[in-house]
Image (cartoon, helix red, strand yellow):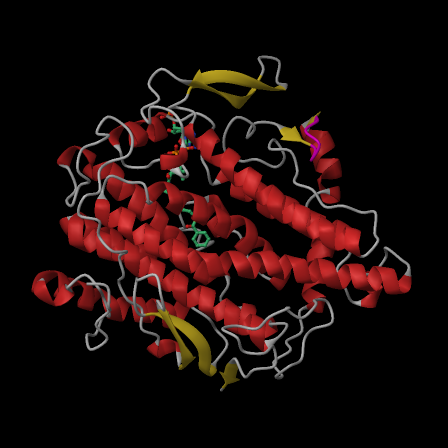
Amino acid sequence: MTEADYQEKIPNNVDLHEDRRLQRALESWHPNFLNWWESMGPTLPTEDVYLRTAVNVGREGWAHFGHVAMRDYRWGIFLAERDENRTIGFGQHKGEPAWQQVPGEYRADLQRLIVIQGDTEPASVEQQRNLGATAPSLYDLRNLFQVNVEEGRHLWAMVYLLHAYFGRQGREEAEELLHRNSGSAEAPRILGAFNEETPDWLSFYMFTYFTDRDGKYQLGTLKESAFDPLSRTCEFMLKEEAHHMMVGTTGVDRVVERTAQVMVENETDDVAALGVIPLPVIQKYLNFHYSVSLDLFGSETSTNVANYYTAGLKGRWLEERRRDDHKLTGDSIMVDSLTPDGEIGHTEVSALTGLNTDLRREYIADCEGGVKRWNRILADAGLPQRLRLPHSAFNRKVGAFSGIEATPEGEVLSAAQWEQSKGQWLPTDTDKTFIRSLMRPVHERGKIAAWIAPPRQGINGKPFDYDYVHLS
Ligand code: BYC
């Protein structure tokens, strides 16, 4: 069965009505979710928004588009179709049938992975809740809300797994997902990047480019999981994730494009007074979001990740394309490390403990694609400036480089040198104040803020000047 049943309170393709206990448990979580959405979700009042709603997990026509009141959005539970013959692709259980239930010995680890994944989803909604008030266009406003409702659905996806497979502990964890809050002093979100602010739209595009992309890679590894319901959930989430990637990629494109245009027209690099974002400020925001997102991959070496892989809980990015034994017991990998005298170096470690590094590398290669793309915009405008990714030792709080400071070029600095120069590389209060000064709402149909270029295409074949959002 792939078609979702929309007659039910909770749309789903998991035959929820056949399990009354589970259905009741989720129905009792539902009002708590709605309370959380009301109190921690988007603050801009709207009548309705042109949103995509998942209705089917098949290849064709999986989503429906239409104007809906956000509170009435049909968050649902969707798992990709089951492959009855699926076998485990890696680790010590390679070749055995995928698990339909959680094996007792892996219960705690699987629950931890699901809770961490689940925690990020509502966190991002909380981080973005005030952005509606300063949207540069109705098109962007609609995309923000689309991302928000889908992150809400991704929370549902993890809560379903917790309720369906982890008993009382799972239900308690599902409650906790609504109690922790981004940036809260008492109960913060689990991962660092999700306690940072997303106070402006440049941050939002950088977040959806760099931090949502961590989501893409982590979901990609969980899609490989031997625990089939987790695998199928992540497969479907990745489909929705593609739009979030698009929002980030083209968002930064459009900022760079507009800046380049004003630089060329006025033959100056000093464009702040002309109401657009100077390239060095864009670079600082990029440096920040990239470095905090690198932290999300954990330490360079980790016995946790080795155990997850060996047990079959979390695979590698595109596991089936890797040309090795998918067990890695005798293999090794070079990872970033500090030399005994505190310099940046490399060490050889077992491939299993180096799996966080393996995934981070895949991610970095993908991020380079974005930078290439933005530099092409600068080159096409005839400008010599270029954006770049900072060194992996820059501004790190997790892993081998968390104890040192380094320049974006990877030169080690003393704490005093870092304090003195970090304002060249990370957004300063002055930069943030400037960016905020540009954040004036443009809520008129077909209009756009002066600091960003309009998109090349609208949503679902609609033009840019479509009435994507009706404000109330
Ligand atoms: N002090 O670094 P760790 C998304 C040790 S985003 C001392 O924790 P791990 C989204 C630790 O004990 C995706 N030591 O990494 C995006 C261990 O030591 P051993 C979210 C410390 O567990 C945008 C070693 O360091 N999903 O979806 O390997 C919008 C390594 O541990 C400390 C996920 O992240 C310390 N303070 O992996 C919306 C997927 N801290 O045992 C959504 C699920 C740690 O090696 N999560 N250690 O001696 C995971 O897969 C993993 O938890 C992580 C971390 C990749 C996050």
Point out residue 334 in the picture as x, y percentages from the top left corner.
51, 20
- At 24% from the left edge and 26% from the top edge, which residue is drawn? 92
Q: Position of residue 24 (x, y in %)?
A: 13, 66
Tally the marks.
Answer: 0
Q: Quadrant of the N terminus?
A: bottom left
Q: Quadrant of ligand 1?
A: top left
Does residue 446 appear to the left or right of 349 in the view shown?
right
Q: Is residue 445 above or below residue 455?
A: below
Q: Residue at x 78, y 55 (%)?
A: 380
Predominant SS along the magenta part: loop
- Whether residue 408 sits left or right of residue 2 in the image: it is right
In the image, is residue 50 above or below residue 352?
Answer: below
Q: Residue 15: horizontal and vertical position, in percent?
A: 15, 64
The residue depicted at 59 percent of the width and 54 percent of the height is 206
Q: Residue 266 location in percent, x, y?
A: 89, 64
* Residue 333 appears in view: yes
Please identify the quarter of the rendering in which residue 18 is found.
bottom left
Quick check: is 325 in the magenta stretch? no
Q: Which residues are magenta?
A: 407-411
Vertical side of 184 occupied by 108: above or below? above
The residue shown at (54%, 21%) is 337
